[in-house]
Amino acid sequence: MLNINEQRLLSDLKELSEIGKTSAGGVNRPALSELDVETRNWFKTKATEAGLTIDQDGAGNLTATLPANNPDAKVLLAGSHLDSVPNGGRFDGPVGVLSALESLRTIKESDLDLPVHLRCISFTDEEGSWSSLIGSRAFIGEITAQDLTQVRGGVAAFDEALARIDCTRETVLQAKCDPSDYVGFVEVHIEQGTRLEQQQLNIGVVDEIVGIQWYWLKFLGEAAHSGTMPMADRKDANWGASLFVQRAKDIVKNDFFPGVLNCGQAQFKPGAFNIVPAEVELALELRHGSKEKLDQMEQIILDVAKSSAAEFELDLEVKPVSKVPPAPMSEHVISNIEKAASGLGLSNTRLMSFAGHDTQSLSAIMPASMFFVPSVNGISHNPKEFTHEEDVVNAGNVMLNSLINLAQNIT
Ligand SMILES: [Zn+2]
């Protein structure tokens, strides 16, 4: 089996980590910032030096292509993102882009004649500094003019930021690719969790990316004097909300493993030491990789909200905020990644991804999957994020051999 140039991959990662480097050892490269522009220029230079062809689409997604001998060949795509969350880590995203870039360089230097154009892609704003997965959603044609007016930070700032990479909201809307040009997509990413580390496994091949549902739940009671209103006569909105959180947590833990639930925000009204809460608004999030289980979970959890409210004679209002369906990964791509990992002698397992990734966008229009390498202590979106060098090298080698396998097994 072919191997990447380990030192070249590690030194790329080191060099890239200098751009937007923070004193805590991480990087700060929010999408479309000056530092993101510097990162993009760095990537273009590296790819040009490797003899690859650089392009940028209307959404600012950057690609580096190694063309096949046959000009009519289709494209096999691989990549991730180079932007970071504010004060983030060095590995989240770059491991994927640089593994893909290094794979293309290695294949270019070898005598392999593959029947596909190989393309490395770095997607714009995966982390959602403006709106999540802008680049990959634009790439699959799933972004609307309205989405682009609801960006974080406001439209004026967004327009100004897009101008830094010679894009406009109009060009973002025109970035849709032609799916018939592509045979598949592969991404490698750090796990951002502890499952691989705990099981001492090298590679996790993702078979599902979770669906995510968000709701506002409003428990409605009656404000009252907290001293003079007898306990027996209260309609305390928080009693219903708290009961709900405890019950819902147990149900998800016991009956919907490995699904997860979070109530990450609560607003009390009127909100004072001495007033019985009239209203508690809870932010509810549900995640599961199986559509069937997520639908079941939704129904049961919303029923529990209703019964928890009823127990204290409260009313309940449910406001759905957003629903992202689970994204099943392609069995064809999964099995070719597994073949690459096993061929390299690396232990591997199948995992659900609990975080969103560009692969979930891509999976809507072409065969796609991704794989994880371990994150130390699962730390991520944090300057302490760390992945051992040998795992970064494994990312590169599994990517390289997955691409070769897929190129030689076009369905
Ligand atoms: Zn990421």
Image (spheres, helix red, strand yellow):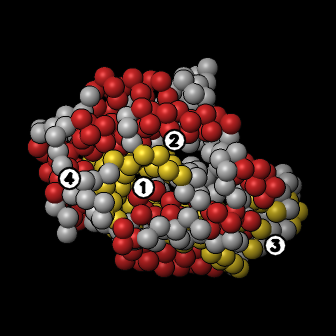
Q: Quadrant of residue 259?
A: bottom left
Label 4 Cα crowd, 10 Å radius (few <14 / some 14-19 / many 20+): some
Q: Mark 1 points at which residue?
A: 354
Spatial CA span between label 2 and label 3: 50 Å
Q: Nearer the viewer, residue 262 or 28?
A: 28
Q: In which quarter of the image is the C terminus?
A: bottom left
SS state under label 1: loop
Q: Residue 114 has which mark?
A: 4
Residue 224 versus residue 32 in the image, above or below: below
Amino acid type shown at disc 1: Phe
Kindly check if marks 4 and 2 are in contact, taking CB atoms under 8 A apart as contact: no
Q: Name the residue under label 2.
A: 82
SS state under label 4: loop
Upstream in sequence: badge 4 or badge 3: 4
Upstream in sequence: badge 4 or badge 2: 2
Kindly check if marks 4 and 3 are in contact, taking CB atoms under 8 A apart as contact: no
- Residue 138 image point, x, y percent: 55, 64
